[in-house]
Image (spheres, rainbow, N blue to C red):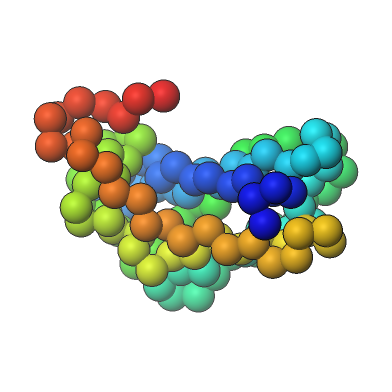
Amino acid sequence: MKEVIEADYQITGGYNDNAVKVSWKRKPYGSHPEWVYLKTFTGGYLKYISDGKRSPIVFALADTDAFCYCDEDPCLECVFRCKRGFTAYFYDAEAGLVELPLDKMTAHWQSGGKAPE
């Protein structure tokens, strides 16, 4: 429900030392989702969002969930899409369950340049 909550993510780190940074914008400003769950290859990670916590939250990855093909930080979102199959779920009392697949792929990786910030 994009009119209530807008979510995004970024993969940081490289090789076997990476994390998923999940961010959100909530209307009205200052409100936040109740929890965020990151579904991964081996299971998942759940974080409850306390009052006063601002976006983003970081999910440090372990085991095979942490594997990626390169050492770019942040991720270049290349054709390999190392986190393909991962999904972030946000729960908000007003918006309900919001799904965010980690499936971004951009063309900037082909030029060897960093993603625009």
What is the quadrant of residue 110 in the picture?
top left
Give left or right: position of 22 versus 54: left
x and y, in percent, of residue 89 in the image: 61, 63
For residue 56, say whether it is visible.
yes
Residue pictured at 45% horizontal, 42% vertical: 10
The N terminus is located in which quarter? Answer: bottom right
Q: Residue furthest right?
A: 51
The C terminus is located in which quarter? Answer: top left
Depicted 83 relative to depicted 77: above or below: below
Residue pictured at 74% horizontal, 49% vertical: 4
What is the quadrant of residue 109 in the picture?
top left
Residue pictured at 50% horizontal, 75% vertical: 43
- Badge count: 0
x and y, in percent, of residue 57 in the image: 62, 44
x and y, in percent, of residue 13 in the image: 36, 40
Give left or right: position of 67 versus 34: left
Depicted 51 relative to depicted 101: above or below: above
Q: Residue furthest left?
A: 111
Residue pictured at 82% horizontal, 48% vertical: 50
Closer to us: 108 or 16: 108
x and y, in percent, of residue 46 in the image: 65, 64
Q: Residue furthest front?
A: 3
For residue 62, say whether it is visible.
no
